Image: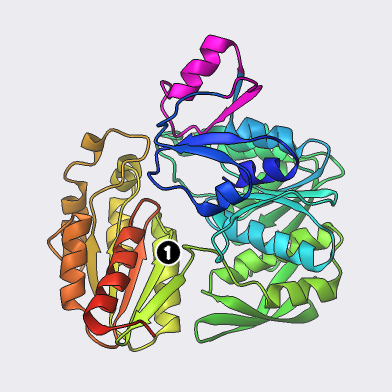
Amino acid sequence: QSLARLLCQRGTQVTGSDRAPLMPDWLADAGIRTAAQHSVPALPADAELVVFSQAIPPDWPELLQARERGIATVSYAQALGLAMRGRQGIVVAGTHGKSTTVAMVAHILEHAQLRPSVVAGASTLDGLPLGRAGEGDWFVAEGCEFRRSFLQLSPRVAAVLNVEPDHFDCFPQADDLDAAFREFVGGLPSDGLLLVNADCARARLLSQFTAAEVEWFGKHSRADWSAANVKLVDGRARFELRRHRARWGEVALPVAGLHQVGNALAAIGLAHRAGAPREAILAGLATFEGLKRRLETLGTCEGVAVIDDYAHHPTEVQAAIAAVRAMHPDRRLLCVFQPHQASRTVALIDEFARELTAADSVAVADVFCARELPAAGHGLAEKLAAKTIACGGDVLQVHSLNDILKHVHAAVRPGDVVLTLGAGDIERVAHGLIDGLRRTHGAAK
């Protein structure tokens, strides 16, 4: 949707379809014609190019029609690479934090009047996707390692936030993942920049495989961009920003979570390279409000706060739970986690179980089997629940979203915090709980 929005703003006629039964209103407002669940599987007569997500099956109706009619087809990553041509690309790669960091960079560059183009797989808090066709030279985008998609992009500046095993259906061996990242950084030009998380050992090794200039961010002693005297106030980080160990300014992040410090440091380094002045960088970060489904507080009713997050990896689960603990200390935390991908759940099941015990009570939903047959996830929720119990966790013995929603609704009491985690449709529980609390207790505060 972000790429569709950018192309539409560039004057391209865009149509499309999706499995989703309901399409956002902004699509029609932007002039993008859509068909939910490909109920109208007909390409326009003058269609010149079909862009497809790698998450859809090869027998998708529009893909079949395109092949029958000889219309060119490209993957989303290929189309993003084409859209970036002629601009100075800034690409954020890594296992965690890409969308937020891209949004931070774009927000800073807008604050600096540099008018960037931006594409990322998330939406702002007003519901609009991170897709914008700016008039400036810079094009900021996510670079996802899944199926080596980021190799379709040709950035001049790039950041690697972290490198951890995640897409096990694509990278069954750790060496395969490292090789993909090495190829990505190897594509940077000699007059470009690679910004690397100095605190991630696997990311640090990538500096050996690029001809570009290398800068570092993080707590490590070699970091060019670092944070000192970090404090959390209501779960939000404040710190002294340092450039080459010298004080460069004070930062107070409006978004929650200690993990946001690393994202902010990366965004600062990228924005600085793009020409944003110090004042715009600091002022831009101070007004960055965050994204949907990134520790998004959906509402509070009768003293029960409901927060939703996209976390679907143990590192992200740990960061999200820690952030909510800092936001709401001394409150009971109920966490509802929906595993995403059977292969990821199997590979990281022990890590998931360990991190989930940080909540006071846990519900494990059935696996959201994106790109996999539903049978692949059979029994995995029960296994993860059992392992979480073995690690000392208090776990509900229900796994369907509907049953979880009923149990959580009945169990919550004033002062509780409910945190939903996952990259699938787990937000149904979060919104359903808010609706249920409103019906039971009156309008949300």
Residue visible at 33% across and 57% down in the picture: 426
Residue visible at 24% across and 55% down in the picture: 365
Instruction: Indicate whether residue 220 is drawn in magenta.
Output: no
Relative to residue 230, is residue 273 depicted above or below?
A: above
Callout 1 amino acid:
Asp
Q: Position of residue 388 (x, y in %)?
A: 21, 62
Q: Position of residue 180 (x, y in %)?
A: 58, 35
Q: Is residue 40 left or right of residue 204?
A: left
Q: Helix, strand or loop at disc 1?
A: strand
Q: Is residue 321 left or right of residue 390?
A: right
Q: Which residue is mark 1?
A: 309
Q: Position of residue 364 (x, y in %)?
A: 23, 59
Q: Is residue 137 visible?
A: yes
- The part of the chain drawn in magenta is 44-71
Q: Nearer the viewer, residue 100 or 157?
A: 100
Relative to residue 107, is residue 257 depicted above or below?
A: below
Q: Position of residue 151 (x, y in %)?
A: 65, 33
Residue visible at 31% across and 52% down in the picture: 339
Relative to residue 351, is residue 241 depicted above or below?
A: below
Instruction: Indicate whether residue 53 is drawn in magenta.
Output: yes
